[in-house]
């Protein structure tokens, strides 16, 4: 729960876990927004930045002759969801915007995974030999 006197900003937090075997901590941040609309707008801006970053990596992969066909499709779908989320926020359809944002996050996650795993186009196909006695 956010305290009633909290200001609209991002607060650093540290989560600590202790047990007999392990001591661990995680540093993160929590943001307080004036409204759900502001939070969704922030999420959309974050997604746009992530989309730009992945687009730069994608461009390098294309130059390196990587097979990025699936990644391009995922990125196109993600961009559509990001744009759709923005329109929903503008129209006040916040639940629909949140759904589009979730879909965009998932598509960008998949695109990033595929981008890291995409093969070279000039790499010869792998040959697997089998011997059956």
Image (spheres, rainbow, N blue to C red):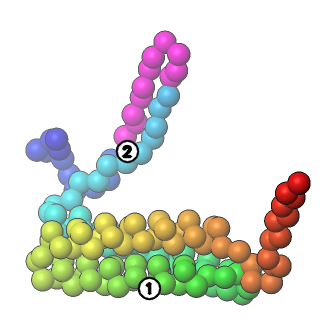
Pointer 1 local density, CA inside 10 Å: few below 14, some 14–19, many at least 20 = some
Query: Can you identify the residue that label 2 sits on?
Result: 12
Considering every residue shown, the one lying at the far front of the view is 133
Vertical side of 12 occupied by 71: above or below:
below
| Residue 39 falls left or right of residue 13 | left
Tell us which disc is closer to us: 2 or 1. Answer: 1
Name the quarter where the C terminus is drawn. bottom right
Quadrant where the image shows the N terminus: top left
**Left or right for 32, reference 57:** left
Identity of the residue drawn at 63% across and 67% down: 116
Please provide percent x and percent y for residue 16: 42, 29
Which SS does the magenta portion mostly show? strand
Q: Nearer the viewer, residue 17 or 118?
A: 118
Q: For mark 2, does the 10 Å Cα neighbourhood hold few (<14), some (14 to 19), or many (20 or more) residues?
A: few
Image spot of residue 60 (x, y percent): 68, 81
Q: On the picture, is 63 further left or further right than 20?
A: right
| Secondary structure under the numbered disc 1 in the rendered image | helix
Q: Is residue 23 left or right of residue 40?
A: right
Residue 55 can be seen in this image: no
Report the residue at 33% width, 70% height from top. Answer: 103
The stretch of residues the image draws in magenta is 12-23
Find disc 1 in the rendering and name its residue.
76
What is the spatial separation of the Cα atoms under label 2 and label 1, in whole angstroms? 34 Å
């Amino acid at each position: 729960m956010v305290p009633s006197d909290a200001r609209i900003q991002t607060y650093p937090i540290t989560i600590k876990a202790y047990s007999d075997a392990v001591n661990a901590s995680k540093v993160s941040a929590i943001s307080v927004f004036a409204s759900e609309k502001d939070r969704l707008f922030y999420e959309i801006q974050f997604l746009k930045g992530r989309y730009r970053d992945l687009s730069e990596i994608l461009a390098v992969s294309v130059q390196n002759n990587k097979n990025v066909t699936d990644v391009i499709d995922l990125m196109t779908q993600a961009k559509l969801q990001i744009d759709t989320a923005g329109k929903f926020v503008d129209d006040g359809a916040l639940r629909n915007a949140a759904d589009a944002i979730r879909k965009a996050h998932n598509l960008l996650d998949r695109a990033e995974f595929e981008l890291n795993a995409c093969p070279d186009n000039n790499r010869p196909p792998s040959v697997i030999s089998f011997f059956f006695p």
